[in-house]
Image (cartoon, grey):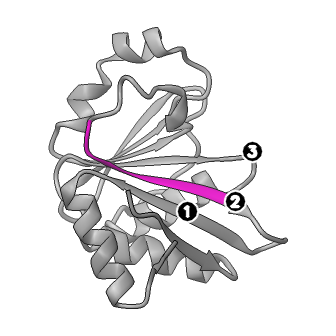
Amino acid sequence: MTEYRFEARDEADTERLAARLAARLGPGSVLALDGDLGAGKTRFSQALAKALGVKEPVNSPTFTIIKEYEGRELPFYHMDVYRISQEEAEELGLEEYFFGSGVCAVEWASLIPDVLPADYLELYIGTAGATERSFLVRPHGEPYAAWCAALADEGVLTRE
């Protein structure tokens, strides 16, 4: 699998990446977000929601697990699975969201690998300074591989 990287100097760069990805997302798109505490998973989700046309404030769904928002054209489902087990994730019926009519951003997605669909975009966010973030992007499945290759050709992502 080809891996890609995106280096963000500041939040504006994070918003730029989110906007470029949002332009390609459609019903059933799943972004699996991981990284250390405070790395920027929620901040990226906020930028993605903004790019999708969500007007209301987006905050961490840590205790509610799933928050639903209306975007310009698609619903946005923001999930945080940090506090649930693999079994609890299966019982929640997340697959209804994954294969539904909206876009899903799943924080701490690596904790529920057996629940994720076969096709999704993995983003690991690492801290590289006070405002700098490094995104390791791994496409799982053909649509995401094509998106990443196109973004690399456009100079947004770099191939690892």
Q: Residue at x 20, y 57 (%)?
A: 142
Nearer-the-camera pick, 137 or 85: 137
Q: Amino acid at mark 3?
A: Leu
Which residue is denoted by mark 3 in the rendering? 37
Tell me which segment is drawn in magenta.
Answer: 118-125
Relative to 143, is 15 above or below?
below
Badge 3 density bin: few <14, some 14–19, many ≥20, Cα 10 Å: few
Nearer-the-camera pick, 91 or 35: 35
Question: Is 15 placed left or right of 134 in the picture?
Answer: left
Relative to 82, is 5 above or below?
below
Looking at the image, is mark 1 or mark 3 earlier in the sequence? 3
Question: Which dot, 1 or 3, sits closer to the camera?
Answer: 1
Which residue is denoted by mark 2 in the rendering? 126
Looking at the image, is mark 1 or mark 2 earlier in the sequence? 2
Badge 2 density bin: few <14, some 14–19, many ≥20, Cα 10 Å: many
Mark 2 lies on a secondary structure that is strand
Which residue is denoted by mark 1 in the rendering? 136
Question: Is 17 placed left or right of 143 in the picture?
Answer: right
Locate the N terminus and report the quarter of the image it occupies: bottom left
Mark 3 lies on a secondary structure that is loop
Q: Amino acid at mark 2?
A: Gly
- Tell whether position 54 is magenta: no
Residues at marks 3 and 2, CA–CA distance in whole angstroms: 10 Å
Q: Residue at x 39, y 76 (%)?
A: 19
Question: Circles 1 and 2: CB distance less than 8 Å?
Answer: yes
Mark 1 lies on a secondary structure that is strand
Relative to 158, is 55 above or below?
above
**Quadrant hosting residue 7:** bottom right
**Quadrant hosting residue 21:** bottom left
- Tell whether position 123 is magenta: yes
